[in-house]
Amino acid sequence: MRIVIGEDSALFREGLARLLEDAGHIVVAKASDAPAVIATIRKHQPDVAILDINMPPDHTDDGARAARSLRDDYPDLGILLLSQHIESQYSVDLLSGGSFGYLLKDRVFDVDDFLDALRRVASGGSALDPEVVTRLISPVRDDGLSLLTTREREVLALMAEGRTNIGIARRLWLSERTVETHVGNLVAKLGMADSKEDHRRVLAVLAYLGHRLR
């Protein structure tokens, strides 16, 4: 996998590059600010861009704005945003396009989970940090959402992280068929049963995230 890293902390940037290279990936370039990372990605056209949300020159949401710009120009580019703190407003728009992940920086130190999230993003899937999902997916007043059982909420939370039915089954110690049943029930309760199979999961997650951020 060919990767570009956009991160202004030299220590974190070099450590992340070493971790990725030790895992067999190729870090084709590194950049320390948003304009440089955009130029670098245009030059190298990697498989995945790993970007810090807060980058120079403004040290606000430069990385997230760069990600939106890159998504417009490179819809198939895998984008993995990293942040020191939960800033959930960046999840919804980019999630809907697939090939997107958003993790807290501490998650990088759980190497196996981090590399698994990276693989999902590179293959067109999604990966949301469990803490982001926990904050976003909580009891809400909307009639459709309030119909979900506790187990269905657990399944939806793992869907939001980007887990497949098999991955959800392993996490919850359920059979894959049971997970399929829960997924079918929750998309029906959210009024999405008639949607195409490959869109249901994203629509269900976006229903939660979108409602939570309104």
Image: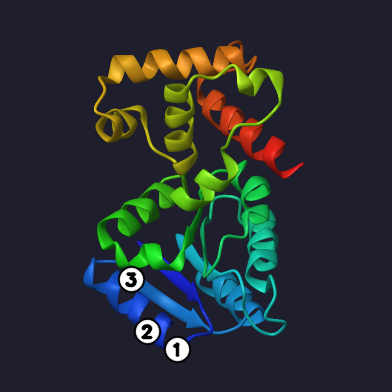
- Residue occupying the point 47% across, 81% down: 30
Q: Are marks 2 and 1 in contact (CB under 8 Å)?
A: yes
Which residue does the numbered mark 2 point to in the structure image?
A: 14
Q: Which residue is mark 3?
A: 26
| Callout 2: SS | helix
**Image disc number at residue 10:** 1
Say what amino acid the circle numbered 3 marks: Ile
Q: CA distance from mark 3 to mark 1?
A: 18 Å
- Look at 70% across and 75% down and name the residue there: 60
Name the outermost residue toward the right.
Answer: 214
N-terminal-most mark, 2 or 3? 2
Question: Residue, x 63% and y 23% (percent of image)?
Answer: 145
**Left or right of 168, for residue 48:** right
Precedes in sequence: disc 3 or disc 1: 1
Which quadrant of the rendered structure holds the C terminus?
top right
Q: Amino acid at mark 2?
A: Glu
Q: CA distance from mark 2 to mark 1?
A: 6 Å
The quadrant in which residue 36 appears is bottom right
Q: Is residue 125 visible?
A: no
Q: Which mark is residue 131?
A: none
Question: Is residue 141 rendered to the left or right of residue 107?
Answer: right
Q: Are marks 3 and 1 in contact (CB under 8 Å)?
A: no
Secondary structure, mark 3, is: strand
Say few, some or many: other residues with alpha carbon within 10 Å of mark 3 (under 14 / 14 to 19 / 20 or more): some
- Note whether residue 10 is visible: yes
In depth, the one of 157 and 177 nearer the eye is 157
Q: Quadrant of residue 209?
A: top right
Taking the spot 58% from the left edge, 27% from the top edge, the residue there is 204
Spot occupied by residue 66 in the image (x, y as percentages of width and height): 66, 68
- Whole-number angstrom distance, CA of label 2 to CA of label 3: 13 Å
Q: Amino acid at mark 1?
A: Ala
